[in-house]
Amino acid sequence: MKILISGVCGFAGSTIARGLLDNVSSREIIGLDNLSRAGSQLNLGPLRRRGVTVRHADLRCTSDLEPIAGLDWIIDAAANPSVLAGVNGTTSSRQLLEHNLYGTVNLLELAKKYRAGFTLLSTSRVYSVKSLSEIPVLAVDATFTPDLDVPLPQGVSSHGIAEIFSIAAPVSLYGATKLASEILALEYGEAFEFPVWINRCGVFAGAGQFGHAEQGIFSFWINSYLRRKPLRYIGFDGAGHQCRDCFHPRDLLPLLEKQFAMTSSDRPRIVNLGGGAGNAMSLAQLSQWCAARFGPHQVASDPAPRPFDVPWLVMDSRLAEKTWSWRPATNLEAILDEIAQHAQAHPDWLEISSAL
């Protein structure tokens, strides 16, 4: 089986590439990456030594894709993952569209050419920011949690946000590029008869994730806390009660293997994947965990709101469990411990990987 992985030198892409070879060593893995993210170059050598053919390529440039032939499957794991991308001055809105949407279109054209299966790693940020912000929440034990004593919007429960939750704008420019990519992927698959699966992923976390807040808040927070770097609770009264769940990208592998084998099916083409309520934690709780591990460190309070931030976003993955028997295998404590061990072993990780 010949598999192409875009964004292969990123945290998710490199984890998936290694895992697929662990499962079946005879696979041919071709990885594409433009190495634009600080830290991504560190994955280049190890992937090549594992037998992955890594090509320096820009998905926006169709000529970079022309030498690739005879594919069986494409996993699109490349993206600018920042919800503030295109609006905070570090990248332009046009660049965001080119990377996250036009790059996916070029990969879909490649899938069309070879009738290759296509898996898109999408995001929880396709859900409506306005609707997420209006979910009634309570602060309990230093974290926001839905107020179950009042009516909740459709698609919200104690389990998290389900696939039927609102995707009405605004979702951020980043979320819009991923939502548009989802729609186009499904249309391409239908029109040109190749299988398409959309995996809406929550927050990834684990050792080796790049130390930038927009690429991995759990890794960034633990590395920064350990090094006594400045940290801030932004918005929501500056208390750090905003809550997210996380899961390890290696937990994607059992699902990907099943999707490879299921070329035609009445199973839902879009599923949420995340750590769920059991793997959820607020920034304040994460600081408490860090304090117990590393000792005290003062976190500043900045109550001023920031665009596109939401108080509570936990993924409800019960549809994936029902239809694919999928659930996250790595618990939150194991993920945090893995990050902490990596942070202690790599004292320069923030400097290597945090620059945009």
Image (cartoon, rainbow, N blue to C red):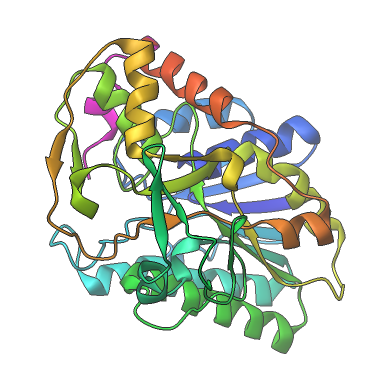
Outermost residue on the front side: it is 149
Q: Which residues are magenta?
A: 345-356
Outermost residue on the bottom side: it is 191
Where 284 sits versus 195, above or below? above
Where 22 sits versus 10, above or below? above
> Which residue corresponds to the image point at 37% horizontal and 72% vertical from the top-left?
134
> Which residue corresponds to the image point at 46% horizontal and 33% vertical from the top-left?
44
Decide if residue 61 is in sight here: no
Decide if residue 253 is in sight here: yes
**Which of 15 and 50 lies nearest the eye of the viewer?**
15
Q: Image quadrant for the C terminus?
A: top left
| Residue 269 image point, x, y percent | 72, 72
| Residue 5 image point, x, y percent | 58, 51
Query: Left of 129 or right of it: where is 240?
Result: left
Where 344 sits versus 267, above or below? above
The reply to whether the magenta stretch includes residue 33 is no
**Which of 198 and 146 lies nearest the eye of the viewer?**
146
> Which residue corresponds to the image point at 66% horizontal and 71% vertical from the top-left?
111
| Residue 270 image point, x, y percent | 67, 70
| Residue 218 image point, x, y percent | 39, 35
Query: Left of 26 or right of it: where is 43?
Result: left
**Which of 14 and 289 lies nearest the eye of the viewer?**
289
How many numbered marks appear?
0
The reply to whether the magenta stretch includes residue 346 is yes
Q: Quadrant of residue 176?
A: bottom left
Q: Quadrant of residue 41?
A: top left
Where 105 sits versus 292, above or below? below
